Structure formats: C-alpha cells, structure tokens
Amino acid sequence: MRTSFLFDHPSPCRECGKAAAKRTTTEWHTDNEMPPYTGNQIVLKTLHRHRLLWDGETYIQKYGYFCSLNCTSAYANRMAATFER
Ligand SMILES: [Zn+2]
C-alpha cells in the first residue's frame, strides 16, 4: 500500500533530503490542436496532446515523509538499531 503525504512546501525526504515534488495533474486532449488553457492552475509543461498542471502550492512525497522505499527502510533500520541497543 502506498502512503503519499501532501505538503504546502517542498518538504525534504527525512533520509536523503530530496525535496518533495510538485503534485501535478495531466490534462489530455484528443483534438489536433490543443485549445488555450483557461483554468486557474499553473501550466508547467505543454506537450503534443497533454499539458502538466500544478495548483501552485501542493507538493507530494510518495512514501509519507520519504521519497522512496529505500529511504524509508534505511531510516527505519537506523531507528530500530538505535532503540534496540
Ligand atoms: Zn529520500
């Protein structure tokens, strides 16, 4: 089960310090020409048939306070070693 956490700032991974990513949504178009964007989100990128949107304030770490399962287990193992000594 994946447990993503959302933040209002680029919260760093507690293990490696990597900043949380912008939480984006992708808007797809099937028309030949993409219509101009009229929404209230920030367009980060426009590609052939889709554009990447961001609300300007939400960041996400995929694994809670961590960027990856490797970072999660590294941190957990260090904690276990510390507390079981
Ligand atoms: Zn990390």
Image: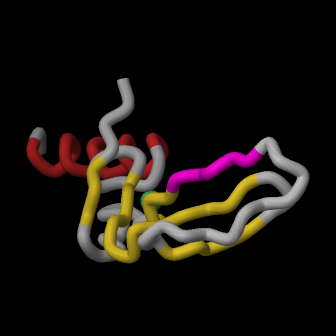
Relative to 6, 70 lies left or right: right
Q: How many marks?
A: 0
Question: Looking at the picture, how far across and down is residue 8, in whole percent?
Answer: 25, 71
Q: Quadrant for residue 69, please give it.
A: top left
Residue at 50% x, 58% y: name it. 24
Q: Is residue 10 left or right of residue 30?
A: left
Q: Position of residue 79 (x, y in %)?
A: 20, 49
Whether 69 is among the magenta residues is no
| Residue drawn where x is 80% and y is 63% of the image | 47
Q: Quadrant of ligand 1?
A: bottom left
Query: Where in the figure is residue 16, as x and y percent of width and height?
Result: 43, 67
The N terminus sits in image quarter: top left
Residue 46 sits in quarter: bottom right
Q: Tell me the residue at 59%/73% (across/down).
A: 43
Expressed as whole percent of the image width and height from the top left, the position of residue 55 reads 39, 68
Q: Quadrant of the C terminus?
A: top left
Give the left or right position of residue 34, taking residue 54 as reference: right
Residue 80, by quadrant, is top left
Identify the coloring: secondary structure
What secondary structure is the stretch in magenta mostly built from? Answer: strand
Residue farthest to the right, as pictured: 32
Question: Quick one: 28 or 9, which is closer to the camera?
Answer: 28
Residue name at image x 33 percent, y 44 percent: 4
Residue bounds of the magenta highlight: 25-29
